[in-house]
Image: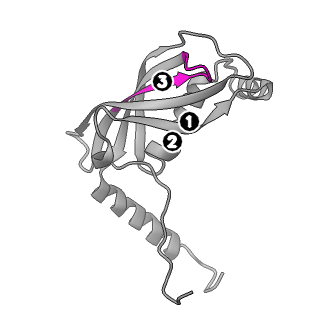
Amino acid sequence: MTDAPMREVVQRGLWFEEFEEGVRYLHRPGRTVTEADNVLFTTLTMNPQSTLSTLVGQSVGQLTQGTLVANLGFGEVAFPNPVFVGDTLYGESVVESKRLSSSRPGQGVVVLGHTARNQDGVVVATASRTMLVWTREAGEQQWAAGASSAASADTTGGDG
């Protein structure tokens, strides 16, 4: 073992430049729907439809964690087949289009087509999502500013 500092890798989504049109991102592992999921989600939200939330949620770690500025909207949401307790949902996302923002420097607009399939490959949900994401340079500046703000907010006087 050496005394050299260990290289660190922070989990994050993709910067604007890393999204490629026509690429399909497969979100794994799948998520098996339980009765408890239905009860909890319905109780918290007054909405009995958790499939869309599960589908979009599966994409966060791979595509948008820490790089998303805002979800701008959803379009063309459909549930062509039912989801049953015990089904395992597998999400995938395809980059349909992308462009730099004309009004927000350092940010870009990306449109994703999301699809959820059950364990048999049957499509149970589709949705189009438009989002605003950071470009690499602007996003890294935001991260650095956040890290320095957190460090300057340390009022413990040292090892804290």
Which residue is disc 3 drawn over? 115
Residues at marks 1 and 3 touching, judged by CB atoms closer than 8 Å: no
Pointer 3 local density, CA inside 10 Å: few below 14, some 14–19, many at least 20: many
Q: Is residue 96 above or below residue 134?
A: above
State left or right for residue 75 relative to residue 91. left
115 inside magenta stretch: yes
Residue beneath the point at 35% across and 39% down = 132
Q: Are marks 2 and 3 in contact (CB under 8 Å)?
A: no
Q: Label 1, on which residue?
A: 57
Real-space Cα distance between discs 2 and 3?
A: 14 Å
Residue type highlighted by circle 1: Gly
**Splitting the image into 4 quarters, where does residue 97 fall?**
top left
Observer-side mark, 2 or 3, equals 3
Mark 1–mark 3 Cα distance, whole angstroms, equals 12 Å
* Amino acid at circle 2: Val
Instruction: Please tell me which residue is depicted at 57% across the width and 76% down the height of the picture.
Output: 154
Percent position of residue 123, x then y:
53, 16
Give the mark, 2 or 3, whose residue is nearer the N terminus.
2
Q: Residue drawn at (61%, 85%), measured in percent from left and top?
A: 157
Label 2: which residue?
60
10 Å neighbourhood of mark 1: few (<14), some, or many (≥20)? few
Residue 38 location (% of width, % of height): 74, 23
Where are the magenta residues, as a range?
111-123
Q: Answer whether labels 2 and 1 touch (C-beta < 8 Å).
A: yes
Inspect the image, locate mark 3, and give the three-letter code of the amino acid beneath it: Thr
Q: Secondary structure at mark 1?
A: helix
Q: Residue at x 44, y 72 (%)?
A: 148
**Residue 92 included in the magenta stretch of the image:** no
143 vs 55, nearest the viewer: 55
